[in-house]
Image: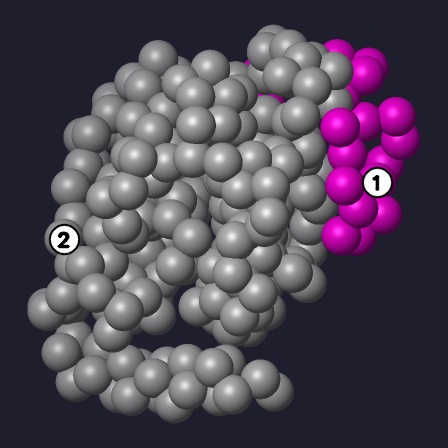
Amino acid sequence: MRPHLRALAASAATAATAVLAAGCGFGFGSLSGSGSGSDDWSQRHPAPSAVGALGREFAAASPAPEATVTPRPGSWSDVHPSENYRVVLLTTGDDRPTKALVKAVEDWAGDEDVDLRTVVADRPSDYIPSITKAMDMAPDLIVSAGNDLVDPLAMVTPNHLSQPFLVVGAELAEPTGNVTAVDWSGASFRGEGLGASSTYDPASFTAARCAAAIRAGVAAVLNDLTGIVIWLDQH
């Protein structure tokens, strides 16, 4: 295990202890809610489904695990989540790319009448506890925005395979089947101490591309095309 991941593992153990001690009163980050849902998510609800179908050129065939697919722009546009879709937006950072991604997710949730709750990790020590907080809410999907969450997600997600995750504007180096990512050459942050790609370009996080990222990613998840990277360079 890489040294920085060993350090994160130690932080995870400490954070887990703190979470258990605190019970429901998380003393980090912040939580907000929006969307159509008025319930507190304490009641079970039907499993989400896709309303509408993917275009034939979204993926040529059922992709292999960790495969990269380059869908035709707009081939996801007819897919929408079913009623009362519960999503947690997990985010950190106030840089321009992260803000653009967060706005895109919020706009998408408003357009699709999604019940969206947001968990913000304010500092590095919050990263893993915030992921735990998001999972404890038992959403249909956790959407991650912010490069600093990539390594913590790489540690946590393999141990929670029943929880779907969507990473927008970055990707995990070795995702498990429950983690889907949407990326492009101007983003392509993979963590593991590698830093940003040489092609990283904050200007590539346009409103149109970020909007495409959340819509294409959710369309893939709703159609069980998970554990892959969706590449948007053609958008």
Q: Position of residue 151 (x, y in %)?
A: 48, 67
Is there CB contact under 8 Å for labels 2 and 1? no
Q: Position of residue 127 (x, y in %)?
A: 31, 66
Q: Is residue 183 above or below residue 164?
A: above
User: Identity of the amino acid at label 1?
Assistant: Pro
Q: Nearer the viewer, residue 165 or 152?
A: 152
Work out which residue is located at the far right of the displayed protein and give it.
61
Q: Quadrant of residue 49?
A: top right
Q: Residue at x 43, y 21 (%)?
A: 206
Q: Nearer the viewer, residue 207 or 199?
A: 199
Label 2, label 1: how far apart the Cα atoms are? 37 Å
- Which residue has dot 1 on it? 63
Q: What is the span of residues highlighted in magenta in the rendered image?
A: 46-70
Q: Position of residue 43 (x, y in %)?
A: 29, 46
Circle 2 Cα neighbour tier, 10 Å, few/some/many (<14 / 14–19 / ≥20): few
Check disc 1 and report its element: helix, strand or loop: loop
Q: Nearer the viewer, residue 193 or 13?
A: 193
Magenta-span inclusion, residue 48: yes
Q: Position of residue 25 (x, y in %)?
A: 10, 68
The disc placed on residue 30 is: 2
